[in-house]
Image: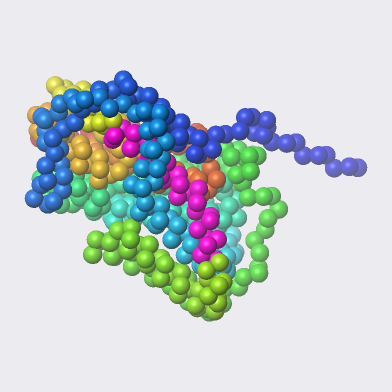
Amino acid sequence: MLAEKPQEPKFKEKSKIPHTFIILFGIIVLLAITTYFIPAGEYEREVNEDGRTVVINGTYQETEANPAGFLDIFTAVFDGMVQSADIVFLLFIVGGSFGILTATGAIEALFNRLITKLNGNEIYLIPILMTFFAICGATFGMAEESIPYLIILLPFLLKLGFDRIIAVATPMIGTSIGYAGAVTNPFNLGVAQTISELPLFSGMSVRIVLLAVLIIVASLYVMRYAKKVLKDPARSLVYGDGQLIPQGEKVTSNHSLTKSKIVILLAFLLTIIIIPFGIIKYGWYMKEIASLFLIMGVIVGIIAKMNDNKIAESFTKGCNDMVVAALAVGLAHGAVVILENANTIDTIVHSLAGLVEGLPSTFAVAGIFGVQSAINYIVSSGSGQAALTMPLMAPLADLLEVHRQTAVLAFQIGDGISNALTPTNGHLMASLALAGLSWIKWARFFIPLILILYAVGLIFLLVVHSFVWVY
C-alpha cells in the first residue's frame, strides 16, 4: 500500500507575510503623512545639574510647520541608520564574534549535552530563561544586549521542539518585563527618578513585587503556548511557513564536550558576567560591550586552534547573519526621525498630557499610565521617554495628588511592556529579523499577553496609589 501524501499546510495558501523592511518603511511613510496634520511645536529645554537635558514644564508653544517631504521619507532611512550606528555596529561585532564561537563547535556540544539531560522537562526552560532575562533588564538594563543570546537560543530551542516565536519570546518578553518592573535599571528608572527628584532606586521593595508578578504572568502565558506546540506542532502560529525546524532533523553527536570546548564556554560565561559588572560599576555602554565580545571572539578562536584566516572567515559569516537585524534597527529609528524633524513629538506629548489634567487622582493614575504607554509607541527609548515626559508628569502628578513614585512606576510599566510590540523598537525588529519571524505573526502571539500585562500593571498601580504611596 502506498503511503498517503502528506497534506500541504494550509498556511502556504495564504498571501505572503510582508517582510520586516516593508512594514518598517510603511510606518515611515505613514508617519510622514501625519506630519501634515499634526501641528509642529516644542518645549523649551535646559541642562540640569546632572548634565541631562530636560523639558521645562509649561513652555510648550507651536512652531513653524515642517512636514516631511517626499525626499525626507528616504533620507530618514539614512539618518536612522546613522543615529542608531552604535547599535548597528554592536550587532555586527557581536554577530561576528558569535560566528567565531559557533565555528568552534562548543555551542553545539553544549546543546547536545543539555538536550540529553533535559529528557522531557524542556518546558521548564521557559520560566528559567525568562526570569534570567527579566532580572537582567530590571537591574542593569539589558535590551539590545539580549540579541546575542537569541543567536544561541534559537537553534537550541528549535531542536527541543519549540518554535521561533518561543525563541524570540524568552529574551524579548523577559527584558521587556524587566524594564516594566525595573529595580536598579539606570536607563529608565534611574533617569526618571533623578528627574522627579526622588532618591535613586528608591521604592525597591514595591518594584521587586511587581517584577515577580510580571514574570509569573508572562511565563505562564508563554508556557501555555509552548505546551500546545510541543504536543502538536501544527498549532504553532508559524507552522507550515518555514518557521519551524525541518522535520526529521535530529540532535547530532558530532560534537563532544571536550576540555578545550569547556574552556571556550567558560570564556563566554566570563564575558557575560563581566558585561553587567562593567555597566553598573563603570558605566560601560555599546562601545565597551562590543569590544569585550570582540576580545572573546579572538580568544575562543585561539583556544580552538583556528588559524587567522579561519577566524576572519568565521567573523565575516557571523556578520552576514546579522545584516537584516542590524538594518532593521536603523529602519525602526528612521520612523522616529520623521517625527523629530517635523517637530511633532512634543506636540503629541503635550496633547496626551492635557488629557490627564483635571482628573480625580485615581483616574489620573490610569491616565498617566495610558499616556506613558501611548508615548512609548513613538519614543521607544526608556531614557529618551523619561527625559521627555517626566519633567511634565512629575509636577502634573503633584497637581493631581498622585505620588511621584507612582508616576515613575506608571512610566516604567508603560515603557517596558510596549517594548515587545512597537515596531519602532529596533531591539524587537532586530530580534524578529534574526529569527526570520514576521511582526504580524509575533503580534498575533503577543497582543493577548500585552493586554493581560496592561491590566495587571493598572491594577498594581491602583493598589500602590491607594495603600502604599498615598499622596
Q: Nearer the viewer, residue 40 or 359?
A: 40
Residue range corresponding to the magenta coloring: 314-341
Q: Residue at x 63, y 50 (%)?
A: 245
Extreme residue in the right direction: 1
Residue at position x 36%, y 42% in the image: 79
The answer to whether one can see residue 134 in this image is no
In this rendering, is residue 36 above or below 184?
above
Question: Is-magenta flag for residue 102?
Answer: no
Identify the image's colour scheme: rainbow, by chain, secondary structure or one colour: rainbow
Q: Is residue 256 left or right of residue 334?
A: right
Asked whether, in this view, residue 100 is left or right of residue 381, the answer is right
**Magenta segment includes 337:** yes
- Please tell me which residue is depicted at 37% across the width and 51% down the height of the picture: 85
Location of residue 19 (image quadrant): top right
Query: Quarter holding the C terminus?
Result: top left
Is residue 33 visible to the viewer in this orientation of the structure? yes
Q: Position of residue 41 (x, y in %)?
A: 20, 27
27 vs 147: above or below: above
Residue 173 lies, in percent from the top left, at 41, 45
Residue at 31%, 47% in the rendered image: 179
User: Relative to 198, is 65 on the left or the right?
Assistant: right
Q: Which residue is more in the foreground, 55 or 363?
A: 55
Return the x and y of residue 356 as percentages of the image width and height: 19, 25
Image quarter where the N terminus lies is top right
Q: Is residue 456 left or right of residue 115?
A: left
Q: Who is closer to the viewer here, 220 or 395?
A: 395
The prevailing secondary structure element of the residues shown in magenta is helix
Residue 300 sits above or below residue 209 on the image: below
The residue at the far front in this view is 71
* Residue 13 percent location from the top left of the image: 68, 30
| Residue closest to the eye, 289 or 362 | 289
- Please give the count of numbered marks on the rendered protein: 0
